[in-house]
Image (spheres, rainbow, N blue to C red):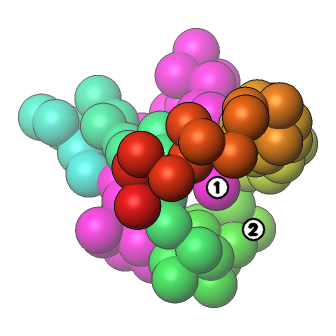
Amino acid sequence: MRLVVDLNRCQGYAQCVFLAPDVFALNGEEALRYAPCVDDARREQVAGAVAACPVQAILVDDAVDDAVDDVVNDAVDDLPPAALDAHR
């Protein structure tokens, strides 16, 4: 899943850091750092962080992941079978 944080909206309350410390961190007292691409195993932690953000600055963008998957799958489907055999 892909995360987008509106850093102009973020006020540094750090609720996300407490709920998903593997994804979010404070750099200094107020600057937020985060991993923009997060594996699905952390979905529950990230959902808690999104819900806890008092200014709603965190957005989970699953549509981007789905679109990328569709493009990759379409590209693989268009390859001749011999091209796939070379990589197995």
The Cα atoms of the two marked residues, 1 and 2, are separated by: 16 Å
Q: Which residues are magenta?
A: 1-24
Which numbered marker is on residue 52? none
Position of 85 with respect to 26 (left or right) is right
Q: Quadrant of residue 56?
A: top right
Is 2 a magenta residue? Answer: yes
Q: Please provide percent x and percent y for residue 2.
A: 62, 45
Q: Which residue is pictured at 50% across the width and 67% down the height?
A: 39
Residue denoted by label 1: 1
Q: Secondary structure at mark 1?
A: loop
Q: Disc 1 vs disc 2: which is toward the camera?
A: 1
Looking at marks 1 and 2 on the same chain, the residue that comes earlier in the sequence is marked by 1
Residue 49 or residue 73, whichever sits in front = 73
Q: Which residue is pictured at 16% across the width and 36% down the height?
A: 27
Q: Quadrant of the N terminus?
A: bottom right
Callout 1 crowding tier (Cα within 10 Å): few <14, some 14–19, many ≥20: some
Q: Quadrant of residue 78?
A: top right
Q: Which residue is pictured at 26% across the width and 51% down the height?
A: 25
Q: As shown in the figure, which amino acid type bears the numbered disc 2?
A: Ala
Q: Which residue is pictured at 62% across the width and 34% down the height?
A: 4
Pointers 1 and 2 in contact (CB under 8 A)?
Answer: no
Residue denoted by label 2: 51
Callout 2 crowding tier (Cα within 10 Å): few <14, some 14–19, many ≥20: few
- Mostly what secondary structure, the magenta segment? loop
Q: Please provide percent x and percent y for residue 50.
A: 69, 61
Is 22 a magenta residue? Answer: yes
Residue 18 or residue 87, whichever sits in front = 87
